[in-house]
Image (cartoon, grey):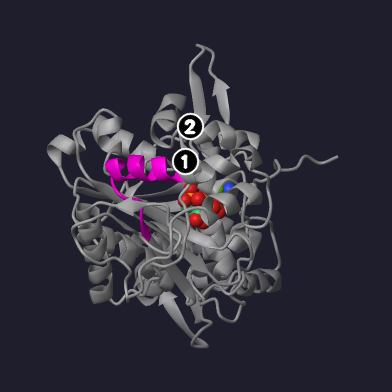
Amino acid sequence: MALQALRGTSDVLPEAITRWSAVEHTARRVSRCYGYQELRTPLIEDATLFLRSVGETTDIVQKEMFRFEDRGGHEIVLRPEGTASVVRAYLEGHLHKTEGFSKLFYLGPMFRAERPQAGRFRQFHQFGVEAIGSASPWVDAEVVTLCVEILRACGLADLTVLLSSMGCRADQARSAEQLRERLRPSLQELCKDCQGRFDKNVFRVLDCKNPACHALAWKTSGSPRPTGSHGIRGSGGHEEVGRGSPFVLCADCQAHFEQVRQALGAAGVGFDDTAVFARGLDYYTRTVFEVRAQGLGAQDAVAAGGRYDQLVEELGGPSMGAVGFAAGIERLLRAQEHGRAPSDEQRSRRGVYLAIAQPALAGEGFRLVQQLRSHGVCALMDYDHKSLKAQLREADKARCQFVAILGEAEVKQRAITLKDLEQSSQETVPLEAFAQTVAQRAKTAAAACHA
Ligand code: ATP
Ligand code: MG
């Protein structure tokens, strides 16, 4: 039996790559436009990194990490997410000393040992940004706006932004105590995991995959939020964030949240701050958000993120604010028109197919093809003695913009026939000027090669 890719992993075959590259290109372009710079971190990390950041009681750490021991007995994991690695790299690369406030983005595979299903894989890909070194609510708003703009630029129209605040660590301690009090009478009804989480990290009950725990935690949390357009009012006392949210905010966190909402309003980004949702990672403080898209079924979160003001310090750096998000590329692609690839007619023609009239001309043809490539023009030729007719069929299949035909007579005259399939025109070009002429004429092809 032929071998197969592991469950929850998949190949991206050439026909799908066009759409992957387009999404990656768009994400990079929009992020750079906002002043974010790319960084790349290893796929394997010391297990401690995620224990200390994502949190020991989270599902990711308890159930979803691929962990193994290397030959020296060190505990290694395949990275399940990007934020912890980016903060580690930020500190290890001394960016806190040389750059201070840094706006970074990454793109790459993440690994989680989850039950594979639609929109949930064991190897999946994330595009993410992290703005490290500022506590300003404007940065929260910038990150949410950037996230929405990337998704829109990728063609996703029907987006819902859920926005909430989890408060600072002091708020979280107070809120945890309250949630524990409310849950205590139903403790026996919680699953085994949640009974363990109850003392260690009661918020994890909020995102338990067991519906009974989930329902109990949310049902018993909070009271109806005050009526009014944005829910949070007053600046003196502690108030709950939204209907059913277990997080009770101090005055500073309320003010921060209010400024984020105002900034998002100014940026024209719509959001829902009444929905209740939890983030399954421990490092979040204050602003958290999730972006949902249409057509994804149960796994409809296409991107999620938030502020993590303690993480840099918790990983050994100075105390500094930070905020980021990660978008799932597979879910994003699925949300784009539910996965339709552009038809041949929609794919624009690019590059040159160099056809040779006889196998004996292969040497001259190969030299010209290499010349074209060194001029940045995508160039193809046949290496298998195909007939001229078959070569022309291949040129069409490969959606080439030009076909150059090299015959014996042409070689004698030091010239070549160049057909533009898009314009349906034909001319004879001197061999000496061939590569330059084509490069100039095929600017779009050159651009595509270098993209
Ligand atoms: P979910 O609630 O769907 O499990 P999550 O809270 O675990 O998501 P994050 O850790 O916030 O997800 O990751 C951000 C984004 O990465 C998600 O919104 C989703 O688009 C994508 N993602 C997360 N896990 C997977 C997975 N196993 N397969 C595919 N995409 C994923
Ligand atoms: Mg998850």
The residue at the far front in this view is 185
Q: Are marks 2 and 1 in contact (CB under 8 Å)?
A: yes
The residue at the far bottom in this view is 424
Name the N-terminal-most of marks 2 and 1: 1
User: Which SS class for mark 2?
Assistant: helix
The C terminus, quarter of image: bottom left
Instruction: Check mark 1 vs ligand 1: CB closer than 8 Å? yes or no.
Output: no
User: Is 179 in the magenta?
Assistant: yes
Residue 150 screen position, x and y as percent: 39, 66
- The residue shown at (24%, 54%) is 253
Q: Is residue 175 left or right of residue 94?
A: right
Rounded to the nearest whole Å, what is the CA distance between mark 2 and mark 1? 8 Å
Residue 439 screen position, x and y as percent: 37, 69
Q: Which mark is residue 415?
A: none
Give the residues in magenta: 164-180
Please give the residue where the numbered disc 2 appears in the rendered image. Answer: 199
- Asked whether the viewer can see residue 368, the reply is no
Instruction: Check mark 2 vs ligand 2: CB closer than 8 Å? yes or no.
Output: no
Please give the residue where the numbered disc 1 appears in the rendered image. Answer: 180
Residue 316, quarter of the rendered image: top left
Q: Is residue 256 left or right of residue 374?
A: left
Q: Is residue 436 left or right of residue 423?
A: left
The N terminus, quarter of image: top right
Residue 58 screen position, x and y as percent: 50, 37
Residue 195's place in the image compared with 116, above or below, is: above
Q: Residues within 10 Å of mark 1 (few under 14, many from 20)?
A: some
Of the residues shown, which amino acid type is indicated by label 1? Arg
Of the residues shown, which amino acid type is indicated by label 2? Asp
- Asked whether the viewer can see residue 254, the reply is yes
